Image: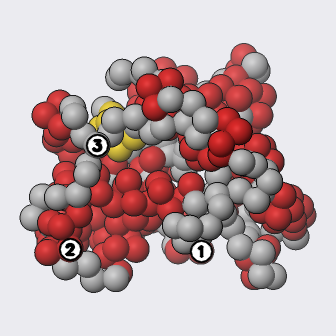
Amino acid sequence: MRTLAILLSSTILLGASQAGSASAGEVLHRNQLAQTIEIAQGQSDAGMAQADLAQMAGEDDNDPLEGLNRGVFEFNRVVDGLLIKPVAQIYRGVLPQQAQDSVRSFLRNLRSPVILVNDVLQGDMDRAGTTISRFLVNTTLGIVGLFDVAAELGIPFHDEDFGQTLAVWGVGEGPYLMLPILGPSNPRDVVGLTSEWFLDPVNLYFTNKRDEDWVPWARAITRGIDARARSIDALDELERTSLDYYAAIRSLYRQQRANDIRNNRSEGEPVAPSVSKAAVTLPDDVVSFRK
């Protein structure tokens, strides 16, 4: 069971070439699949024109390994087409929307401790308070997170990961990377995601239980399937309308990560109210990860 779960999680967590992102992008936790999915959904809903995507592709893409990355991207697309997307379609067809929403709400609630730690590390105590409030409300009134009662009460969800925290501390992102199965990333986020995979309290608890150490992988698989199911239409449309699908995914991913790091603030606003980036500034090459 554990071997099968590991194999499937490595495949399901970001097939769509990231395809195409929560938080393995859960398999290493902050599933980049969920991120790119949210990006694609937002841009598709906004009706981004091909010309806009082409213009983004011409911007500084920080992609010195583009040849290799494109090869990995095509591999991910094959895996997605053969396994991930078909499974996601079955998931979407079998489960009613309310059940899918409960799955996502439950998984988000499990992630609350990681979000809280990163809120605090970034010096954002307001968002830390929001995270605590959401966890208490959804764990109790929401029946261990199956229902997002907090959102209905005006306490919105937000996500944080250690890659964002490193960015707030001044660590450079490094070159753009397209990872097998996991999809779009960079060295800074790889370090952050790997750290969270091993430090997530839920993962730690079940990993240390001999007969239940498959649970983190099952959690990763479920998040990957749910995220891919929600992205099917948006990613299909993005691929259909893009002059260069790889470049579109790359540009959207980098824009969204920059926005996540700023917590949706405008360019000129400070990233965190209580932490000075200048206090912890490291050179861009502090991370030398290569996949």
Q: In the rendered structure, are the residues bearing label 2 and label 1 in contact, judged by CB atoms less than 8 Å apart?
A: no
In whole angstroms, how far apart are the C-alphas of marks 3 and 1? 40 Å
Q: In the rendered structure, are the residues bearing label 3 and label 1 in contact, judged by CB atoms less than 8 Å apart?
A: no
Residue 234 in which image quadrant? bottom left
Q: Residues within 10 Å of mark 2 (few under 14, many from 20)?
A: few
Residue 166 can be seen, yes or no: no
Q: Secondary structure at mark 2?
A: helix
In whole angstroms, how far apart are the C-alphas of marks 2 and 3? 18 Å
Q: Is 13 in front, or is 256?
A: 256
The residue where tag 3 is placed is 62
**Nearer the observer, disc 2 or disc 3?**
3
The residue where tag 2 is placed is 52
Q: Is 60 in front, or is 93?
A: 60
Q: In the rendered structure, are the residues bearing label 2 and label 3 in contact, judged by CB atoms less than 8 Å apart?
A: no
- Looking at the image, residue 18 sits to the left or right of residue 213; the answer is left
Farthest front residue in view = 278
The residue where tag 1 is placed is 98
Counting residues from the start of the chain, the first of labels 2 and 3 encountered is 2
Q: Residues within 10 Å of mark 3 (few under 14, many from 20)?
A: some
For the C terminus, give its image quadrant.
Answer: top left
The three-letter code of the residue at mark 1 reads: Gln
Percent across and percent down for residue 58 are 17, 58
Counting residues from the start of the chain, the first of labels 2 and 1 encountered is 2
The three-letter code of the residue at mark 3 reads: Asn
Query: Which residue occupies 57% across, 30% down?
Result: 282
Residue 40 can be seen, yes or no: yes
The three-letter code of the residue at mark 2 reads: Asp
In whole angstroms, how far apart are the C-alphas of marks 2 and 1? 35 Å
Query: Which residue occupies 20% across, 74% down?
Result: 52
Query: Which residue occupies 21% across, 32% down?
Result: 65
Q: Is 1 in front, or is 14?
A: 14
